[in-house]
Image (cartoon, rainbow, N blue to C red):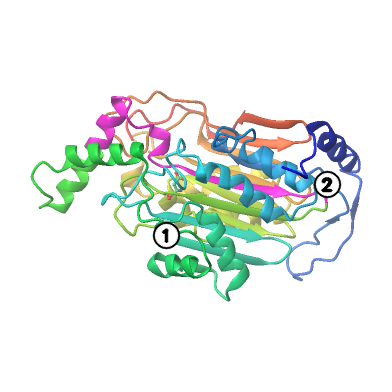
Amino acid sequence: MGNAISRRDFVKTAGVLAAGTGTAFGDGPSPGGEGPIVLAPRSVAPVVVSSANGNKYRNGGSRTCVEEAFERIVRGEDVLDALVAGVNIVELDPEDDSVGYGGLPNADGVVQLDASCVHGPKKRAGAVAALEGLRTPSRVAKAVMELTDHHLVVGKGAQDFARQLGFEVEDDLNTERSRRMWLEWKRRIDPQHWVDPSRRSEAGRAAARAMIAEGLLDPQHVFGTINCNGVSPKGEVCGVTTTSGLAFKIPGRVGDSPILGAGLYVDGEVGAAGSTGRGEANLFSLSSFFVVECLRRGMSAKDAGIEALRRVVSRTEKRLLDERGYPRFGLRFYVVDRKGGFAGVSMYAKSVPSWMDAFDPPAKVVSFAVCTQNGPETRPCDVLLDVDPPAEA
Ligand code: ASP
């Protein structure tokens, strides 16, 4: 990259910018005229925060998502452009089977992708859902934001929109691996056709459970997504979320990721939040919106995220609670505030294998990715429920 800066340069730049943090806030009026007065920062320590996959996949290059986005932000690039360039790395990496190209397909073997983005300073948003044939739905979401009067375009309309703009539309986004996984799942659930929808759905779950137990599927990627939020040295906040959604979902199922207020919410005067995990739980409480409202009332990024998880638990239907009264699913939020405060929070410290009952999960510590002037890191999330995740989801 011709205009790339060295790590030492950007650390130096960020360090200088960060030197003013904590003392450089003026008494700016609240432009919205509602809620408490929002302090307008003159200089903040830039930060990019994302789900853990944002510091894992490189698509054969040298940088992870959070690293790429952070370097671009520090160079002065538009924050949303930088974040989208970051998540593009994960979308294009066939190794991440929860996002973009290589994402696991729906029950019919078709890869359908969802994405959303919000530009805080511009007060604009765009999203796509059930989009087929495009490896980088985040870019199409950004085009919806930039070029249309709308916030959400779905299905065939979204694909046509992308084609008209010159995006490459492919017939089939499956990789060899995602197709193999789908074929294996299909083989297991449908020895005799799908006559009884309820039995079909139970068979589908049993098949996925067995495939996880055999090490074919990663339980973390039955649900899976990347959310990435960032703040520039000027306090400009943006966010993006992109996903292939729930693996082997009912065709047309859309989760939280492309829904403003659910999988992503940004208020440029306050902060940003986005999520990964059981989209339905998040949709039911519009949790990202709730997180940002908690920030607005003065909560820290961590407390705001934990409060949203608490709200989700209190609004969870009985069928989704275990015998202890705890949710049988995982949910995580990634939060930044306009002053550069950030957090990754999770329902449980260890991973939950979602709806796969009777499966003994190889529980992993749930973490998030962050890039600051100290470089990219993967850190454990702060946790709401300090108990073992449900043994049976
Ligand atoms: N939240 C996404 C969805 O429900 C999936 C995930 O993040 O794991 O579509």
Q: Which quarter of the picture shows residue 219?
A: top left
User: Looking at the image, which residue is at 56% across and 67% down?
Assistant: 144
Q: Nearer the viewer, residue 269 or 173?
A: 173
Identify the element where label 1 is drawn. strand
In the image as oriented, which residue stretches furthest toward the front? Answer: 2
Q: Amino acid at mark 2?
A: Val
Q: Nearer the viewer, residue 373 or 263?
A: 373
User: Looking at the image, which residue is at 37% across and 41% down?
Assistant: 175
User: Looking at the image, which residue is at 38% across and 54% down?
Assistant: 112
Instruction: Categorize mark 2 by other alpha carbons within 10 Å: few (<14), some (14-19), many (20+).
Output: many
Identify the element where label 2 is drawn. loop
Looking at the rendered image, the quarter that the N terminus falls into is top right
Q: Position of residue 193 (x, y in %)?
A: 10, 49
Instruction: Categorize mark 1 by other alpha carbons within 10 Å: few (<14), some (14-19), many (20+).
Output: many
Q: Is residue 225 magenta?
A: yes
Q: Which mark is residue 44?
A: 2
Q: Nearer the viewer, residue 300 or 173?
A: 173
| The residue stretch that appears in magenta | 207-233
Q: Is residue 130 visible?
A: yes
Looking at the rendered image, the quarter that the C terminus falls into is top left
Q: Earlier in the sequence, mark 2 or mark 1?
A: 2
Q: Position of residue 162 (x, y in %)?
A: 49, 65
Q: Is residue 96 magenta?
A: no
Estimate the spatial distance between the alpha carbons at disc 2 and disc 1, rounded to whole Å. Answer: 36 Å
Q: Is residue 341 visible?
A: no
Question: Label 1: which residue?
Answer: 131
User: Looking at the image, which residue is at 13% across and 50% down?
Assistant: 194
Q: Which mark is residue 303?
A: none
In the figure, is residue 294 to the left or right of 103? Answer: right
Q: Amino acid at mark 1?
A: Leu
